[in-house]
Image: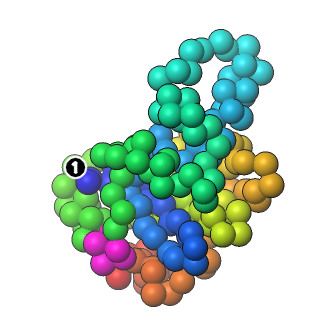
Amino acid sequence: MIIEKPEVNIVAVIVNKTFNWYICSKDMWIMDVNKLIKSYEDAGWNFDFSFLPEVQHNIRVVSKANLKDYLAMYTGEYEKVSVSQLKEEILYSQSVCETMPSEFKLENELLLPDLLIDFDCEIFYSNYWGFTRYESYMPNGWQAYRQNFEKLIPENERYWIVKEGKYNVR
């Protein structure tokens, strides 16, 4: 999958004390679709949300218990990858996207993951630079932060390195 931000996200997911990397559509990881729908209603917009997979499959709040079913809904829109596969995907995407405007290239801070979702501790971090505010749609009881979280990624899972103040693929 070509990683073209902001359309495609790099997401770290922790579940059952296991760290996983996903490359996925930006449409994934609205954790509580009821809150998304309510935000539109509160703004005075009355849309039909029946097209959303979460509504169609009645998975309106993503949890550790229904994560497998949630991922099944989005088959074809994500890849679960190892850190070495992720590095390869990034390098490939960089080579394919050389002609893109610089603000969309996978370089510097854009190399960093967009989301960190810890299902074990119910904590969500967003470093996403697009328009979606994922942290606004968290299940009740979850903690959500919009901030850089690169230091929270275990060293052995980091696919980037900082050299001379710039981010590069390891």
Mostly what secondary structure, the magenta segment?
helix
Q: Give the range drawn in magenta.
A: 82-86
Q: What residue type is labelled 1?
A: Thr
Q: Which of 154 and 106 is in front in this view?
A: 154
Residue wearing tag 1: 99
The one of 12 and 163 positioned closer to us in this rendering: 12
30 inside magenta stretch: no
| Residue 20 image point, x, y percent | 46, 70
Whether residue 68 is visible to the viewer of this picture, yes or no, is yes
User: Which image quadrant for residue 119?
Assistant: bottom right
Q: Residue at x 50, y 28 (%)?
A: 56
Residue sitting at x 61%, y 48%: 62
Q: Describe the colour scheme in one phrase.
A: rainbow
> Which residue is rendered at x = 50% and y = 66% of the image?
12
Where residue 79 appears, as percent x and y from the top left, is 33, 58
- Which quadrant does the C terminus fall into? bottom left
* Quadrant of the rendered image containing residue 111: bottom left
Q: From this view, report whether residue 32 is shown above or below residue 44.
A: below
Would residue 147 be seen by someone viewing this image from the given angle?
no
The quadrant in which the N terminus is found is: bottom left
Q: Which of 152 and 131 is in front in this view?
A: 152
